Amino acid sequence: MTVLRAQALGKKYGSHWALKDCDLDIPAGHVVGLVGPNGAGKTTLMNLAVGQLRPTAGDITVLGNKPGSGPAQLARVGYVAQDTPTYAGLSIADHLRLGARLNPGWDDALARNRLEQLGLGLDRKAGKLSGGQRAQLALTLGIAKRPELLVLDEPVAALDPLARREFLQGLMEAAAEQELSVLLSSHLVSDLERVCDYLIVLVDSRVRVAGEVEELLATHHRLTGPRRDRLPADQQVVSASHTERQSNFIIRTEGPIHDPAWTVTKLSLEDLVLAYMDESTGTRLRPLEVQR
Ligand SMILES: Nc1ncnc2c1ncn2[C@@H]1O[C@H](COP(=O)(O)OP(=O)(O)OP(=O)(O)O)[C@@H](O)[C@H]1O
């Protein structure tokens, strides 16, 4: 099953495209990392996926339906917005009661067990929790809704490294135990590297690359060797830098690299993301770089 499909999807604010020509086809069962610089369009894509925004152009379906198309669809998708919103004046128990009332598939036992494991007493007010505890409460509410897709907008941004690790650990466990698909945005590529098996890089309102992490890492390479200005046509140049004598390319290719002049090295996910986020990438993809 496809969890999210976008075809030529676009969203415009006034004259500014926040998201443009977005094509995605994400199979269910993945933890999907959405990464990109500030203002790239990540929140816009997430808001479109949960039905809080309507597209200006193109189409989006989530779990086969139009986002926000009715109560049944709303019950299938959980959303933890940026800054992990909770009600400061309400206790944790109040949040659980609210969750039970608003969500037909609410799993109260799951929520209580999780909070107990985290050592969060039900009588505590959300406004008196630390940032990490509040993020854990918001995650618990999102998971206990028992959605098929959980969307999280920068949930770990404000957390210290230990709290981040605990949060992401909890998320991975929930994804595995509940067969949950997750769409998660973050600026912290090292965190995404730990939990995500599918990646979307969004830059300047456009999807630069999307796919399974394993496949992306298998098809991207760094080539270092004597100066070259051209590469074979089946090697897509993602980024290039040259000195007078040496060239350094990051390429995408399905095939083997036979040229003995190159030293070929594997990329980490962070290298790959940074190569696509490099703002001059667009100019580096000119046919000039390609030998036809
Ligand atoms: N309600 C709005 N009205 C006008 N412009 C908006 C609105 N919301 C977002 N934008 C603009 O759309 C673009 C994409 O914003 P978006 O919030 O989706 O980016 P983002 O990738 O989530 O950024 P960040 O990492 O900073 O959260 C930005 O240029 C932003 O200024």
Image (cartoon, rainbow, N blue to C red):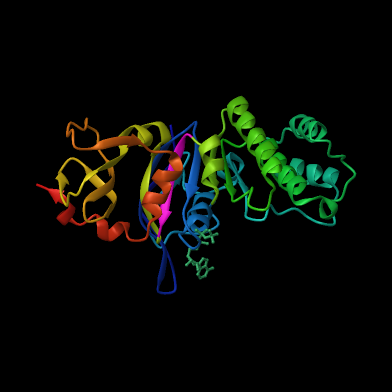
Residue 220 vertical position relative to residue 237 in the rendered view, above or below: above
| Residues in magenta, as a range | 197-203
**Residue 287, located in which quarter of the rendered image?**
bottom left
- Could one spot residue 23 in this view of the protein? no
Q: Quadrant of residue 97?
A: top right
Question: Residue 177, position in %: x, y?
Answer: 62, 25
- Nearer to us in this view, 100 or 22: 22
Q: Image point 50% across, 31% down: which residue?
A: 29
Residue at position x 21%, y 42% in the image: 235
- The residue most toward the left is 292
- Of the pair 173 and 53, the residue shown nearer to us: 173
Q: Residue at x 76, y 43 (%)?
A: 101
Asked if residue 289 lies left or right of residue 65, the reply is: left
Specify whether residue 202 is painted magenta. Answer: yes
Q: Position of residue 100 (x, y in %)?
A: 76, 40
Give the main secondary structure of the magenta stretch. strand
Q: Is residue 201 left or right of residue 164?
A: left
